[in-house]
Amino acid sequence: MQVLAEIQERRGWRREIWGFDSFAGLPARQAGVDPTIWSEGQYATPFEEVQLRLQLNSRPWLRLVKGWFQESLIADPAASIGPVAYARIDSDLYASCVESLAFLAPSWSSTFGRSTRMSGSPVILVSGWRPILAGLSSIWA
């Protein structure tokens, strides 16, 4: 988010940038699905520390939403976000990644048709969970 914020500032842009995180670290991993290298609570960072680092007080177009994806992505303010042009999903665990994709593509067809959430030619970058293609069938079926 910091890099995107800096690019916008250099170019004079003010597009909304949203970040969603639990700030409590990773949720419990699913045995047999998620790699064993991660543990529950790993990567926890206080919300206030991230707020300061991202300078949210001076960047009103930069928004952070605290909570687990299965809760924060189905309620406001997430539910009222307009078309998304770029989405970076870095969720590390399978369930979190699928929840993020489900948020972005509520009406996509199995052939990646139009979405009510994504803009005309969106870019979706998925990092973290390597066998992500296994989860796509549950989203775009």
Image (cartoon, rainbow, N blue to C red):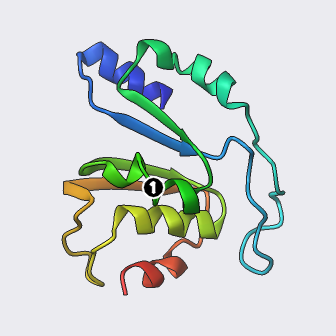
133 or 27, which lies in front?
27
Element on which disc 1 rests: loop
Tell me if 64 is positioned left or right of 11 in this view.
right
Residue 56's place in the image compared with 110, above or below, is above
Residue 21's place in the image compared with 72, above or below, is above
For this orientation, the residue located farthest to the left is 120
For label 1, the crowd category at 10 Å Cα-Cα, with few meaning under 14, some 14 to 19 and many 20 or more, is few
Spot occupied by residue 66 in the image (x, y as percentages of width and height): 59, 42
Q: Kindly identify which residue carries mark 1.
A: 75
Residue displayed at 27% across by 74% down: 107
Tell me if 103 is positioned left or right of 93 in this view.
left
Looking at numbered disc 1 in the image, what kind of residue is underneath it? Ala
Spot occupied by residue 92 in the image (x, y as percentages of width and height): 65, 58
40 or 48, which lies in front?
48
Tell me if 18 is positioned left or right of 71 in this view.
left
Q: Quadrant of the C terminus?
A: bottom left
52 or 97, which lies in front?
52
Which quadrant holds residue 116? Answer: bottom left
Spot occupied by residue 73 in the image (x, y as percentages of width and height): 47, 56
